[in-house]
Image (tube, rainbow, N blue to C red):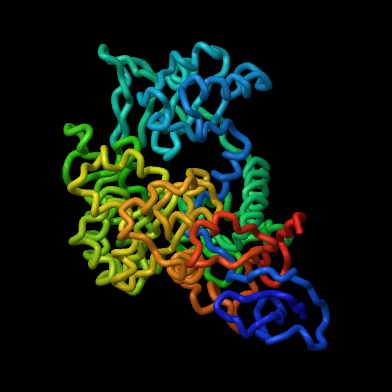
Amino acid sequence: MILYTNCNVYERPDIKAILCNKGKIIQLLPSGNINSGKRIDLKGGWVYPGFIDSHMHLTGLGWSLESVDLVGTTSKLDALKKIKEEIKNTPKGTWVLGRGWDQNDWSKSEYPKATDLDLISMDHPMIFRRIDGHAAWTNTLAMKLANISENTVDVNGGIIIRDDIGYPTGIFIDNALDLIESQIPEKTEQDIYRQIIKAQTMLNKFGITSIHDAGTSKKEIKILKKMIKNEELSLRVYTMLNNNPKDYDSFLESGPEIENPFIKVQSIKIYLDGALGSRGAALLEPYSDSPSENGLLIIKPSEHKSLVKKFSKSGFQVNTHGIGDRAIRIILDNYEEVANTKIRNRIEHSQIVHPDDVPRFKELNVIPAMQSTHCTSDMPWVEERIGLERMHEAYPWKSFIKLNIPVPGGSDAPIESPNPIEGIYASVTRKDKNGLPEKGWYSEQKMTLKEAIKSYTEWGAYASYEEKIKGKIKENFYADFTVLDQELKSTNLEMILDARVLFTILNGKIVYQSNEQ
Ligand SMILES: [Zn+2]
């Protein structure tokens, strides 16, 4: 037994101590004045149910922590400087990897070129994913290793950007990325293990106790299980299997794994379209800033349908990446036609949703898994992409909530910061970290603070079928807590960003403790 004392509990002003045993909450108490075994003083902190990030990339986050970080670069030159610094310590011939650039943030917002990177090194193959992960910038050596030339034909669901005379410029989009990335040596188990450790350390520091991993390989599941056995995993992981028979075949055969409280294998992640930033999101009407384009589908609708049918039949939840209104309509149509509606299928991102399709989520029992910081990061250029007439479709989380549809929140880390406090702030303000725009961007779609906290707790638990054991501070629920140094207050939303994590508690044990106290 452990007694957590000297705390305030979210929505329970009557409670000042929590008694836990074997990973669960046993009793909520008005004071710590009881005789118990071990006592831990929570220093007057505010206890929230352990935060759940319902869409992120665990090893992707770990990988990003050890590769060139181009997030926030203000110009191409700025990005090149960072890469040059990295190359100093990298032996010739070794791949230099990174991510996070966004030409929309640069002083000149056009795609960079291979020749820009060639100026830094001709001896290191390089590839840098764009902030949304859906485009990559490479140098000439990388293209040479992949045998890319003016004769390379485009691949289905992908684009090779070319110059006026047909030569690839060094930018590859969606499925075309594989042409280059297939040349990168495969990660070893040791690499994956190290990246998971790095990622979970960061996540625990941000108060996260559970994640939904949006694309897990069989190898990663094996490593995660080994970590659980060795008591090294400090997160609960809800996996979404990669849409790759090599990763899902054996699970499809044996059925969902739901018994282990630290890892569940119960869903598949399928990509249907690309992202808005690289005009890969599939739209019903053309892009307002590029009338010849309406986005791309990574797989055919019929192929998606047969995957939905196959996984639904075996009891797996289907989580499809859908950003544009055309992709979202195709997914809903396929779910309607062939899915078991008792299964809580999901649409990951659900960013641009036609108003006719919003109520269909409710009818079909489909969960929109949304990431509010995508909204606040994208807001400077979304109007340009989709035009004013469609803006009522953009990031419409309140429209879903009004219909009683749960909206699990997430970060899509490493695309955005995994800090849930930033996610909660973006959900309730629709403002950037500088407090702009002043009234919030399309503010009718703001969540209330209560809803935003639900999106990181209860609704995340619902999205993984765990709402009866997780997401609330209640007897018999998991003893997963995020302890903040202050209360999150709806009367002072600007203060939310000042909140700091004092303790992160998973299964009754402290997995992170701030040393600032
Ligand atoms: Zn993602």
Residue 34 seen anywhere in this rendered image of the structure: yes
State whether residue 115 is above or below residue 5. above
**Residue 292, quarter of the rendered image:** top left
Where is residue 164 shown, x and y percent of the image? 26, 14
Where is residue 412 shown, x and y percent of the image? 47, 50
Describe residue 146's horizontal placement relative to residue 260 as left or right. left
**Residue 336, quarter of the rendered image:** bottom left
- In-front residue for pair 87/309: 87
Where is residue 407 shown, x and y percent of the image? 39, 64
Give the residue displayed 34% in from the left and 70% down from the top: 405
State whether residue 25 is above or below residue 504. below
- In-front residue for pair 333/20: 20
Quadrant in the picture for the C terminus: bottom right
Describe residue 70's horizontal placement relative to residue 343 as left or right. right
- In-front residue for pair 204/181: 204
Quadrant in the picture for the N terminus: bottom right
Where is residue 462 shown, x and y percent of the image? 45, 71
Give the residue displayed 21% in from the left and 32% down from the top: 290
State whether residue 262 is above or below residue 414. below
